[in-house]
Image (cartoon, rainbow, N blue to C red):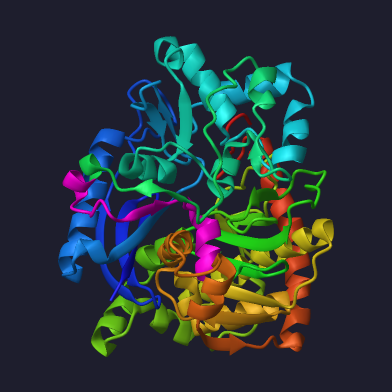
Amino acid sequence: MQYLLAIDAGTGSVRAVIFDTLGNQVSVGQREWRHLEEEGVPNSMSFDFKANWALVCECIQEAIRVANIDTKDILALSATSMREGIVLYDKEGKELWAVANVDARAHEEVKYLKEHFEGLEEEFYAKSGQTFALGALPRLLWLKNNAPEIYEKVASLSMIGDWILARLSGVIASDPSNGGTTGVFSLVKRDWASEMATKVGLKDDIFPPILEVGTAMGLVTQKASVETTLSTQTQVVMGGGDVQLGCAGLGVVKAGDVGVLGGSFWQQVVNIPSQTPSPQDMGIRVNPHVVDGLSQAEGISFFSGLVMRWFRDAFCDMEKLEAKERGLDVYEVLEEKASCVPVCSYDIMPIFSDTMKYGKWYHAAPSFLNLSIDPEVCNRSSMFRALEENAAIVSSINLERIKAFSGVEFSEIVFAGGASRGALWSQILADVTGYKVKIPKVNEATALGAAMAAGVGVGVYESLQSAAKELVVWTKTYEPNLENKKLYDELKQKWQKAYEVQLKLVDDNITTSMWKAPGL
């Protein structure tokens, strides 16, 4: 038997997952990691490349040990990572400085760029699909302003997944799907747009070669072999961004394919041709896909899964006890009770994540509207169902906005992530959107996507599309109830009007925003 290794560097943990060439998971090694705020640097989220490389090595060693295989049988490996996080190197290829994905230290630099380069963010967004908020340019400007001795040594830049591959192969490079999230990029050309750095007075010669996902980079080096126990015969292959490779692992690989990824945050992604102009209102993010010739229009809902976890832990002790007695997951018990609540949950309106407004994005204060003092109407079950409905409503609005600007038509959604395990939530998503919802049989979509990339690099699969066709299996389909959709359409309109009023309370300093983008 031969194997493929995927390394998945997420926000909260890093994992090494070994698959066989049929897509079956063989073993996993996982370590949690933390990205700490630097002392005296508000809103920073540094990436400790020295400590974290040791964790990557531990994960690889554990996965190999648990699989109990000869490392020479691992044909190839690839990596995927949180997007936006960057690593900077000196001319010898040694790490100088790194930050994780939602590092927001460059608040003042974002404001500076907006105020002193009028219209530049709009110009760059039209080309890259990204705004300044979490891009590389403000972070590089912060480094130039606050640590010039480090900035002057910078010779190269990569993303965090690329950093893992560089450590293993000795080659610093990036791919469109992850590199594109720096914002210093052309969606059409699928390559760096280094002139953006020039325009704001930053180095423009630090951007490494761009390789398409699935491109072989070289063999595991002797040094990396000693550190990880990997064989020097294993091929290192270019990977990509976690959402995009996760989509590959879910079969979302053709133009017009749609995915809703229901995790801590929810992403709504639609595959569109790379030539598609970005929306003029900068409302939606656009990223290069891992498939050449495609981009992904991406809506994001903040904290949808985290809000559900908060609700469970804050209010649902009784359901936790019941779940333990019945041998069920607490969410199964909550869904069971919520399924008895009428559609629209008595018009209870959760106010948490707004729909995506990428150009000027902030959220209202967390709250529930339209609560009742009738315990038969307003209780944990109705509030739980309202949260599920609201996540679907926000997703629906983001998807319709993508459809409006892209002209791409679609009729079905691939629903994945922890939320997709809920039968009620899956049906609600179908009812709210009016689209058929398909549930794939995969627990490790992102890692599987990286394994697919590794397999493409050594010829196990012809392409990511063919790998998806061969490996992705569907477990269930939910058809929309169009009568329910009519009710949800009315609730959706009410919710949008209510959210505008809640944002006004933030503007007037009466309530506190759940989250604001840097620079606002």
Vertical side of 279 occupied by 395: above or below: below
For the C terminus, give its image quadrant: top right
Residue 99 is situated, as x and y percent measured from the top left of the image, at 42, 33
Is 196 part of what is drawn in magenta?
no
Look at the image and tell me whether residue 320 can be seen. Answer: yes
The image quarter containing residue 89 is top left
The image quarter containing residue 388 is bottom right
Q: Which residues are magenta?
A: 225-250
Residue 345 is situated, as x and y percent measured from the top left of the image, at 61, 77
Horizontal side of residue 433 vs 9, given as left or right: right
Horizontal side of residue 182 vs 419, given as left or right: right
Residue 86 is situated, as x and y percent measured from the top left of the image, at 46, 35
Vertical side of 509 occupied by 503: above or below: below
Horizontal side of residue 213 vs 389, given as left or right: left
Q: Nearer the viewer, residue 424 or 502?
A: 424
Vertical side of 67 occupied by 141: above or below: above
Q: Residue at x 24, y 86 (%)?
A: 325
Is 241 part of what is drawn in magenta?
yes
Q: Residue at x 35, y 38 (%)?
A: 170
Vertical side of 403 occupied by 157: above or below: above
The image quarter containing residue 476 is bottom right
Residue 292 is situated, as x and y percent measured from the top left of the image, at 65, 56
Q: Residue at x 39, y 47 (%)?
A: 218
Q: How many marks?
A: 0
For the N terminus, give its image quadrant: bottom left
Look at the image and tell me whether residue 103 can be seen. Answer: no
